[in-house]
Image (spheres, helix red, strand yellow):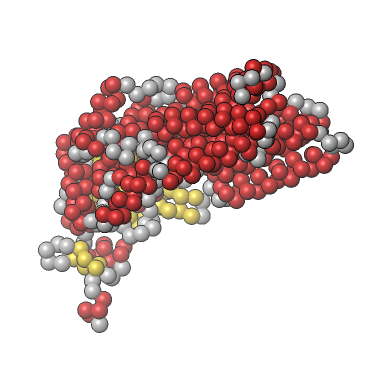
Amino acid sequence: MLDLLAYDFMQRSLLAAAMVGGLCSVIGVFVVLRGLAFVGAGTSHAAFAGVALGYLMGWPPLFLAILFGLATVWITGWVEERGRMKLDVSIGILYTTTMALGILFIGLMKTYNAEVYGYLFGSVLSVTPEELRIIGAMSVLVLSLLLLFAKELYFIAFDQEMAEASGVPARQMFFLLLTLVALTVVVSLKTVGAILVFAMILIPASTAYQLTHSLTTLTLYSALIGIITSVCGVLISAVWDIPSGPAIVLLATAMFFTAVLFSPKRAKRARLIHAH
Amino acid sequence: MSAEETRESHSNGRNPIIRFDHASFGFPGLIALKDISLPIYDGEFVGVIGPNGSGKTTLCRAVLGLLPPVEGHLHIFDCACSELRCHHRAQIGYLPQKGVVDRNFPVTVLETVMMGRYGALGLLKRPGKKDRQIAMEALAQVGMETHKDTALGHLSGGQQQRVFIARALAQQPKVLILDEPTTGLDITMQHNVIELVQHLHDELKLTVLLITHDINMIRSRVDRLVLLKTKLFAAGPPAEVLKPEILHQVYGKELVITENDLVIVEDYHHHH
């Protein structure tokens, strides 16, 4: 395994996995707490449609992915604010529409394009130095914005109306969160793929949720779990020659169920029920 | 009683901190509160009562500046609703109705109360020692300082209510709005929470707006009662508002006032 680490591509993919894992799991805390899980899933499919359109027309795929992702989250946020439609209905429609567009764009391509499928299923082992730089820059951008507005974002995740009532610009913060979710999804597309990126956002935060009652500890645990599972997943994928996306996600899922089984919250609840 | 009389009899020369002026709230075609004219004065303890769906929570959201009037005017701290900025909102502490907030949210008691500081602090500023001290004082005021590191979800309903009141106090507000703070609590807890609110009103000279169904619990404590049913039916000292003819109009025939001034639901079977 050590000689594997000597390869440039291996170093690049481990670095990419660590950054994506850390980024996804930190934004995941806010997504899980604010109840935006389905929004993220929809965004990743929209972003994929953008990638497919990019390859079809010969335009930069990542740029279109960002455009599609942002359009989806902003429409979703706007619909939720208006209260016209239930959030799961509006995102369900956008989710399937963008997926249909993605499939349509692939169908319109004259030739089979393996790179497009890389975005669908993830191929961290083929990350180029340029992609690594983009991932690095976007991670720094998203994480610094999260850090700068952490207190407001925690508050709107807890209760948006209460936050607004007590003088936090809650609506702006909600749209900031949606924007950061979209950017995170796009950055992670190449590494874990459109189908699995949402697992990386959801699972580490949900695992950490089982283990603590404090917001700061929750965020730290989530980031640790995200980075560890991503890096280990890539190593497993390289050593056993299996696809990296599923390796990362299945490892994270295993950790999640372990955490559920040994959750101190669960133990406490069981004791409480027993006591009554 | 008209709004003009209310103003004269209770102003004592003070300026209203909140002023409704023929204000209506809701959506065009679906008005939740119609033509409200009501001043609320600095340091008053006001109870808001009325049947379900009478617009109590709408009134509350309006005072929080979350719901601008569709007609008429609402002035909060001498600002029209649309001029209300974040630093104004920070001066109004709010306890939402139970069930609105996820009480199993992974947050400790102190973290919850610290959120009360966020609006007042403003963007990009990190809470410091002073904010922590204010939060601890707020916890002490509600008698929960020993629980500062406890998970919110591990507390009883009454204790959680105290923590949420402390969160509102951490804003160092001028006005405290409580939306049915006793719902879902047992009778001693209900009493404790109302006692606490009264204590905060007396001690911190807070203007308190308390929304409740429990007329008997608050009638002896509040300065004024506001009786709503889509419009303002009455506003004034409890003795003036809790009159049989007014209550019958709002609640129907079921409410009666007993000899010792308790408002009770008339036993239907007793009379038939």
Q: Nearer the viewer, residue A110 or A222?
A: A222
Tell me which residue sits at (67%, 35%) in the image: A242
Tell me which residue sits at (28%, 26%) in the image: B132
Residue B134, image x and y in percent? 25, 28
- In the rendered structure, the answer to whether residue B220 lies left or right of residue A274 reads left
Tell me which residue sits at (64%, 30%) in the image: A239
Residue B49, image x and y in percent? 29, 54
Q: Quadrant of residue A8?
A: top right
In the image as oriented, which residue stretches furthest toward the left? B260
- In the rendered structure, the answer to whether residue B31 lies left or right of residue A106 reads left
Residue B123, image x and y in percent? 43, 24
Res B255 seen here: yes
In the image as oriented, which residue stretches furthest toward the right? A110
- In the rendered structure, the answer to whether residue B138 lies left or right of residue B92 reads left
Q: Is residue B115 above or below residue B99?
A: above
Q: Nearer the viewer, residue A268 or A76?
A: A268
